Image (spheres, grey):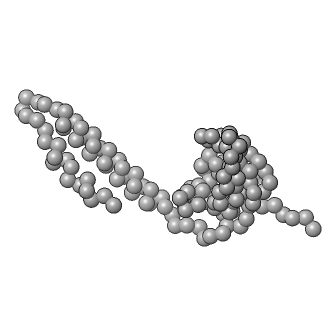
Amino acid sequence: MSEILLKVFPGRHVELELRYESGERETLSLDVVPDAFADFDNAFLGESTALAKAILGHSAGDTVTYQAGDWVRVRILAVLPEWRATPADHSKRREEVERKAAEKSDTTSAILFASSFNGKWGDYDPSTLQGDEEEET
């Protein structure tokens, strides 16, 4: 009886060997998930990332070209059913982080402008713009 090889798709767990230009190798163990659930720090690889796109549709034993930094190839060691339940949707958390970053950027721009502006009616006081900076979590 021949072994059925699973292909890499969202919902699969993959064991990978990344190969560097120098010949060094690194192994990764990841679950491929829809982008809304991506969290690389917790081993959930979003399906539209460059790494996922390189391995999607391939099976264990395949080696594919993957050029990112000094990585040159990826060898797929194993493709298994998903090991863990799909993680929580992190899109709301990402949106909140992006919103806070944009607000901080806008505030920083306003402070820089206020610090450098001298007008005929007086100078701006940037200290009034710094009120919420210490509330970050």
Residue 39 lies, with reference to residue 22, above or below; the image says below
Tell me what residue is drawn at x 42 percent, y 55 percent.
95
Give the position of the N terminus as an image quadrant: bottom right
Residue 124 visible within the image: yes
Quarter of image, res 87: bottom right
Image location of residue 57, percent across then percent down = 74, 52
Q: Residue furthest left?
A: 121
In-front residue for pair 66/11? 66
Q: Residue furthest right?
A: 1
Tell me what residue is drawn at x 24 percent, y 40 percent.
110
Residue 137 lies, with reference to residue 127, above or below; the image says below
Tell me what residue is drawn at x 70 percent, y 53 percent.
17
Residue 60 lies, with reference to residue 87, above or below; the image says above
Image location of residue 133, percent across then percent down = 26, 53
Give the tally of numbered discs: 0
Q: Does residue 104 appear left or right of residue 126 in this picture?
A: right
Q: Residue furthest top?
A: 120
Image location of residue 108, percent across then percent down = 27, 43
Q: Does residue 116 appear left or right of residue 42 in this picture?
A: left
Tell me what residue is drawn at x 60 percent, y 56 percent.
45
In-front residue for pair 27/75? 27
Image location of residue 118, percent across then percent down = 13, 31
Residue 55 visible within the image: no
Give the position of the C terminus as an image quadrant: bottom left
